[in-house]
Image (spheres, coloured by chain):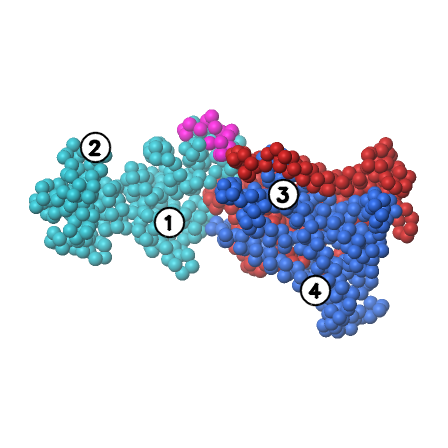
Chain colours: A blue, B cyan, C red
Amino acid sequence: MEKRVLFKGIWLPLLLILPQIVITAVFFFYPAGQAIWQSLFIPDPFGLSSRFVGLGNFDYLLSDPYYRASFVTTAIFSTLVTLVSMGVALYLAVLADRLIKGSGTYRTLLIWPYAVAPAVAGVLWLFMFNTRVGVVTWYLGLLGYDWNHVLNEGEAMGLVVVASAWGRISYNFLFFLAGLQAIPKSVIEAAAIDGARFWTRFRTIVFPLLSPTTFFLLVVNIVYAFFETFGVIHTITSGGPQQATTILVYKVYSDGFVGQDLGSSAAQSVILLVVVSILTIIQFKYIERRVHY
Amino acid sequence: MATVTLTDVRKSFGKTQVIHGVDIDIADGEFIVIVGPSGCGKSTLLRMVAGLETVTAGEVRIGGERVNDREPMDRDIAMVFQNYALYPHMSVFDNMAYGLKIAKTPRAEIEARVQTAARLLQLEPYLGRKPRELSGGQRQRVAMGRAIVRKPAVFLFDEPLSNLDAKLRVQMRLEIKQLQRDLGVTALYVTHDQVEAMTLADRMVVMNAGRADQIGAPLDVYADPRTEFVAGFIGSPPTNFLDPAAVGGQGARLGIRPEHMRIGPAGSGRITARVLDAEPLGAETLIHTRLPSGDLLTIRQDGAAPIPGEGDEIGLAWEAADEMRFGPDGRRV
Amino acid sequence: MTAPARTRKAPPPGMVERRGAGLWLTHAGLILGVAFIFFPIWLAFVASTVSQPEIVRPPMPLLPGDQFFENYRKALVSGINAPVALMLLNSGVMAIGIAVGKIIISLLSAFAIVYFRFPFRRVFFWLIFLTLMLPVEVRIVPTYEVVAGFGMLNSYSGLILPLIASATATFLFRQFFMTVPDELAEAARVDGARPMQFFRDILLPMSRTNIAALFVILFIYGWNQYLWPLLITTDPSMNTIVMGIKQMFPSGDDIADWPVIMATSILAMLPPVVVVIGMQRLFIRGLVESEK
């Protein structure tokens, strides 16, 4: 797609695009290049020189049980976050879509958490489940359940999943509701006249027609779970207990900044780079498809 | 107030040539209409005069000066676009005043010129409105007003009426003609509508596939088309074409206008045809017929004349002087 | 979204639209969802209005107390490491800086890409596109080194600049410019407008809604940044509020000052929530557009 009308000139457009290119070069490409470069070296303990190790850092990483565990953790975490946030959002969107009046009010009430930063969401949920003062912890105690996400790995994972999913429900809800409202009512009414009950209609008509939205949200939510949940994890568990909630992004941070293991951190960055690239390409393919149909 | 001269103007997009050398001489104050089917290159030609497209080869002169390399604003032209191209966020007044503001015209003069144009176009009550609050006809006037206030030497119109309904189109056509006469500005007008071309033009240019097939006064072009294409394109209903073998004489194609054919009883006249259908329009009646060869002919007769029945055999006659014969290359012989 | 509701004629009773008990069940389900969404925020608000002793002896109350002014005053004026008022200011500067910066450089580059032909245009376009694949999280250590090298640690420029190159905003504006009829630019050329006059007088005013919608999204994006400010602001007076909350927790076994922390959390979510709720229409538009 190109415009027919063009203004003449070469220097003006170059000048116009310059700020973005400079910032992109300095803060995106140079650091990314550095990450790739550093991933091939191991710095000496004093940081004065470094030794070329080729793919040594990657070899080491991929055989490192902690790193492999982090991969598994990330996979479990993203799957759960995506399922929980999309599931709840779809449920609420279907309900809101059934209302003739008032769906706007519910929408206003449900989009709040979008504005809440993941790190703040983490603090809110940490407060509820705090082992000493948490109100939910206390009521669970009354029921005889001893909640302690500081020690229990499963509970820690559960808490970061719920806190991450909670913040994401609004976003998914908005897109699901828009998708549902875009389905022509006549189609659903025709199915109703054909005798399909609500659940049958949902399964055979609504959900298939909603699949573009669902697929789009699937990719977007995985990206979110991979990269944007750092704040939740950092505030609630700091990756613990025993690295049970150390997702890949958290590990890049903790190895690079806390552990000062620059070679390994750089290699991890490169691996993440590959992951984002794959996700972006999937997303882009999907967008392309949407444009064509 | 200027002459416009196109000398062997050519245009290529990449390797495809779309204008194959056009020569037009436009006199000062003349109203020229470029007419042709879509894709014939008429808009491209206009846009080259405007300076919105570069000229691949040849020369465009306005007021005697070569303007090939000048920006549109330096050509002393104004243009009315098909979709009006009004700035949606500006009021009618600002739309008309924008060009003058850029030219740093004094505020008082801008005011005066816009007011004059608004009065001329009956837009005074709407000066404060946004384009989306106007009807199609009013938007059209604003587009015209924007052209007028600049007091250009040449008006360029790119199918300005094609977005209006039929009734409004007729009215605006008259207004455009009147305005151009009053202002005495040279006008170059592009349309695909041959009625518009016939009614507006001092001279018209019939374009076909990137060439100017014929340039002349509307009635001259109508009466004496230079090519088969022009004969078929100008006139409604269009010229009938048949194979000269059926009636004898030279040429590859024979054209006769519907009003030049007369109906007689079967066996009379030059050729026999079968009536398919008759369309009585009141003042006139169109009779559609088919020749044994399969060619379809339309005859236009007076509304009061008797109408033959469907399926009737009739004889068709015409004057030899009304015959238009064309060679295999489509040119008149 | 009143439009879809208006177009729906009442369907046959009981077929598609729920009546009676079904309608109440629908409302009940939604209210349950709203409660789930609101409960954490409500608790935080309650905690920000009671005293520390009321919290550390569980269960804490579920209705607001009388310490509202005291807690918020304490948070805003003194905070724990730095006054929260200062952190709010830092967040505001960062969020507005990122939003405005992204919008400006994206408008300019989209204008160049759409309306001009110049050498390396495609290369630049792809370079910008590739930034989609380089979120801060992926290149933290080297980006930190670059920023440190420029001496931009603990500075607004360090907070803002690395985050203002945005492929998303550039694409959004490119997309919008593509839908602007070519004739408008031609008319402006005939009117004598130079490229930048066309940009300022025609294109910018026409992009107002898009700019506003994008501003809402980018403001929230900037306000909610966590990892980046965490890395580059070691000086508490440069902390942003979102990352500053975590710094308010004591290390070791000390008990956190929950009322002040919760008051800070409420303050941290207030500006973006006001923006989202107040500009809901623009926000939803921005959200949908920026994901296209």
Numbered label attached to residue A93: 3
- Tag 1's secondary structure? helix
**Residues packed near mark 3 inside 10 Å, few (<14), some (14 to 19) or many (20 plus):** many
- Tag 4's secondary structure? helix
Q: Position of residue A87 (x, y in %)?
A: 66, 49
Disc 2: host chain: B
Name the residue beneath numbered marker 2. Answer: B283
Disc 3: host chain: A
Disc 1: host chain: B
Nearer to me, A209 or A11: A209
Q: Nearer the viewer, mark 4 or mark 3?
A: 3
Q: Amino acid at mark 3?
A: Ala
Q: Amino acid at mark 2?
A: Ala
Instruction: Tell me: C88 left or right of B213.
Output: right
Q: How many numbered markers are drawn?
A: 4
**Residues packed near mark 1 inside 10 Å, few (<14), some (14 to 19) or many (20 plus):** many
Q: Are marks 1 and 4 in contact (CB under 8 Å)?
A: no
Name the residue beneath numbered marker 4. Answer: A271
Do marks 4 and 3 both belong to one polypeptide chain?
Answer: yes
Q: The magenta stretch spans which residues?
A: B120-134
- Tag 2's secondary structure? loop
Disc 4: host chain: A
**Residues packed near mark 2 inside 10 Å, few (<14), some (14 to 19) or many (20 plus):** few
For image coordinates 43% across by 44% down, the residue present is: B75
Numbered label attached to residue B45: 1
**Considering only order in the chain, which callout, 3 or 4, is on the residue closer to the N terminus?**
3
